[in-house]
Amino acid sequence: MSSIILPETAQPYNADITTPNWMISGMEKVMQFYVDRNLRLDTVSAEMMPNPIEGKKYMLYAHVPFCHTLCSFCTFHRFLFKEDKARAYFISLRKEMDMVKALGYDFESMYIGGGTTTVLEDELARTIEHAKKLFPSIKEVSCESDPQHLDSDGFKQLEGLVDRMSIGVQSFNDDILTMTDRIEKFGSGQQTFDKIMAAKELFPIINVDLIFGFRGQTDEVIQHDLDMASRLDPRQITTYPLMITHQTRKSVKGKLAAPHGDMARQYRQILNSLNGQYNQLSAWAFGKANNEGFDEYVIDYDEYLGVGSGSFSFLNDTLYVNTFSLRKYQERIANGQMGVDQQKNYGRKEVMQYRFLLGMFSGRLSRKYFRETFGVNLDTALFKEMTSMKAIGAIKNDPTDPDKLIVTDNGKMMGLLMMKEFYSGMDNVRAQLRKPLKACDM
């Protein structure tokens, strides 16, 4: 039982997840089929991003691919930090932003991911300042960090520049931190707790990232993580499931991952603990307010443009991929070219299925959105998807609004599984793009 005290008027949440394990496994297999089919590397070469379309809103993503240490379960695009290379990279990143401005883009929001974005706080601060000068419509900047940098003097340079800081805690349990090789890198759970508490005053929104699904992560361990996060009273808490990809299958599945059947029970515990304290922003994100940005920026923005090595863009139903070679990225920028290297166009049905996935994951599945965006009736255009989700009790009609659909607790579980498999598929794509890299590319 949670030790968190709810307001007297609040009723304890009792998650109604009735999805059996065989159905969970079946959904994962279905998603793996679609992910393998739609995230194939059948791209064609690309040299330039398209021009913006008037009336569309865009989000700017910037990737910082450097880390002081490389975690075994992380599959994001990153290199070991070397200061000279990192400083040169930030200069190129700002030059690529200049090229984006020349195309006519403006952005409402900026998200900076990694890697570890805060490896050089002074360069990161210059880059954010440059972006805000180039794109005056930016209203919110989100950024990621690991616990290592929270108490550095340079970290304070980001105050007033970053609106939302997401901190990768993963767990406050020292046994889990030891098993994942994080305790020597970032300190104990209590040390991380103290660093976050001290850094809270620097940013309007602090998000605490936790991961569930580790081996040895009992109900008591998960509850302790949730209670520690709640004691910090951050504006947001995100609870990711541990993701197993082709490249981490041996290291993660055998050594780090909990038995597959534990997922539904652990997710039920998370829902029961956090609902009532927080509003649910997505299947795994919780916030104090309903209208603030969070890690899954693709929910709020259909179109986004990425700068930096290994970044992705989705514009006009086309996926654009920046080169994963650090050397090639620097050469392209030095020659006045953008970092984009490949592109892949998606058909209308594939894009609708993708938006359906995001609607399930975010709990914002809307007939009106599909009617206005694609000019279709959701129930007939995606008949198979809608019928199956209704059959397992994942969605139901909103009695107050015929355009809206209610995503139930079963639906949240399905949304979590679907998004987990989608992200695992994207990680597999990153692994394939990194595979040809040689020492000179890093």
Image (tube, helix red, strand yellow):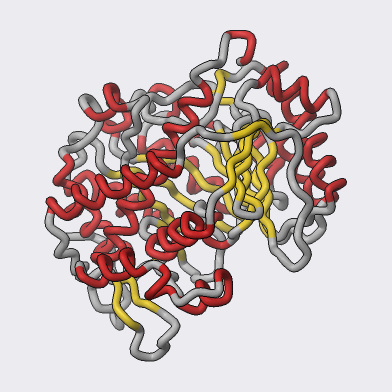
Pick the front one: 110 or 234: 110
Tell me which corner region of the image, top left, top right, bottom left or bottom right, holds residue 275.
bottom left
Q: Which residue is painted at 27% across and 33% down in the image?
A: 176
Whether residue 183 is visible here, answered yes or no, is no
Q: Which residue is painted at 49% across and 52% down in the image?
A: 207
Residue 243, position as x, y percentages in the image: 33, 38
Relative to 213, 243 lies left or right:
right
Whether residue 173 is visible here, answered yes or no, is yes
Residue 415, position as x, y percentages in the image: 34, 58
Q: Which residue is painted at 78% across and 47% down in the image?
A: 131
Q: Which residue is painted at 57% across and 76% down in the image?
A: 372
Quarter of the image with the N terminus is: bottom left
Is residue 227 positioned above or below 173 on the image? below
Is residue 330 positioned above or below 271 on the image? above
Residue 126, position as x, y percentages in the image: 78, 38
Pick the front one: 304 or 150: 304
Residue farthest bottom in this picture: 400
Is residue 417 positioned above or below 214 on the image? below
> How many labels, in total?
0
Residue 319, position as x, y percentages in the image: 59, 44
Quarter of the image with the C terminus is: top right
Tell me which corner region of the image, top left, top right, bottom left or bottom right, holds residue 406.
bottom left
